[in-house]
Amino acid sequence: MHLQVLILPGDGIGTEVTCEAVRVLKHVAKVYGHELTLTEGLLGGVAIHKKGTPLPDETVKLALEADATLLGAVGLPEFDNVAPEKRPERGLLGIRKALGVYANLRPVRAYSALLNSSPLKNHLVEGTDMIIVRELTGGIYYGTPRGISGEGAETRAVNTMTYTRPEIERVARMAFTLARARRRKLASVDKSNVLENSQLWRKVVTEVAAEFPDVELEHILVDNCAMQLILNPRRFDIVLTENMFGDILSDEGAVLAGSIGMLPSASIGARKPNGAWVGLYEPVHGSAPDIAGQNKANPLGAIGSVAAMLEYSFGLKEEAAAVNNAIEKVLESGRVTADLKPAGPPASTTDVGQAVCSFIGGK
Ligand code: NAD
């Protein structure tokens, strides 16, 4: 297979973890006999420095031409106090919009070697394996009217939570499709006891469920879901939710995995004629200025994002499983970065990337 991938290393540890993710991608391509064409683009603070904007037109063009995009992280402290439209993070929203990716997938797995890293009791977390599917382009973050008006006691702030039927249908279909390839259980999260928006969400998800009779659907209120994620995370397989609820619940999910450096994500959208998803893949963490440039960052979230890319954008399930198995073996070997609190001296970012490749092995 010919894989054309755009690499956007970004800022801070983004460049370091991406370097290891690319090492793993190249290794997989070599071992499994795929042709790999990599292009590199600018996004975030580095793009502001070189091109005067966080998302140069050239980067959008490259992303639209590529089969998939792999992103590191963006953000530099020197931009912390500038206007939002001039910040590196604006580039992220821009590239998601340009690619039309409307669903954010966050796999949450509790690796047995990391159970002690989770602040929760081992017996609660053990065996957790879910994907949180968050709608990414609608809901209260984008709805209008919005804004703050008036003054003093008359000051009023408004945000609008809005969804259309097609917006719910497409993300629901994607989530049900994913459930089919897993344990065939889907929990749809809403607040339908209070919000009309959630009533529409529940109605449309129920209708879409009729197309997937082999998937078990459960509706769960967001407040109960927040509690169940901590009390009994194993009960979840696919968790489907709207934008703001997903934003909050997926960070709660991150706690289950032990370190933010472990978490991959995939933002996917339309299907290509060959059935593959248009996708943007990135670790969940930011550019971590506190450890940038020190070869200390955990690259496993970025490497897990490569596994997600292989599976969703290229349909290469065996290759994706090989990467995920190698991640597990690295964790079991104890050769991990400082954030995972190894018993001995911590491994470097580069060590971990090399270890993943050696556990994938040759063929
Ligand atoms: P962060 O995720 O960068 O860091 C939070 C903490 O986690 C830090 O202590 C950091 O050292 C640690 N950490 C993060 N990733 C790690 C890894 N792979 N290995 C080991 N430790 C890791 O979040 P922040 O400090 O709030 O933000 C820093 C910058 O990143 C800001 O400019 C922010 O806007 C940006 N940011 C970008 C993204 C993105 O690009 N998707 C996401 C979040 C934050």
Image (cartoon, grey):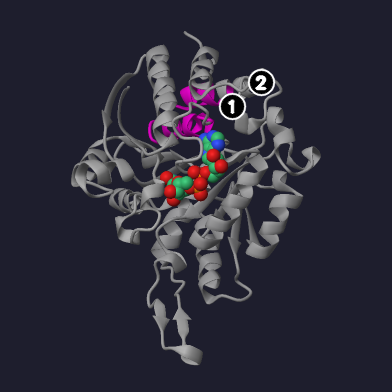
Residue 300: in magenta span: yes
Callout 1: CB less than 8 Å from ligand 1: yes
Q: Which amino acid does label 1 sit on?
A: Thr
Is residue 146 visible in the rendered structure shown here?
yes
- The quarter of the picture where the N terminus appears is top left
Please report the residue visible at 42 percent of the width from the left and 33 percent of the height from the top. 309
**What secondary structure characterizes most of the magenta part?**
helix
Q: Does the magenta stretch include residue 105?
A: no
For image coordinates 58% across by 21% down, the residue present is 347
Q: What element carries label 2?
A: loop
263 lies left or right of 55: right
Residue under pointer 2? 334
**Pointer 1 with pointer 2, Cβ within 8 A:** no
Per the rendered image, the range of residues in magenta is: 298-325
Residue 186 in the image, given as x and y percentages of width and height: 60, 50
Q: Name the residue under label 1.
A: 337
Please tell me in which quadrant of the rendered image residue 80 appears: bottom left
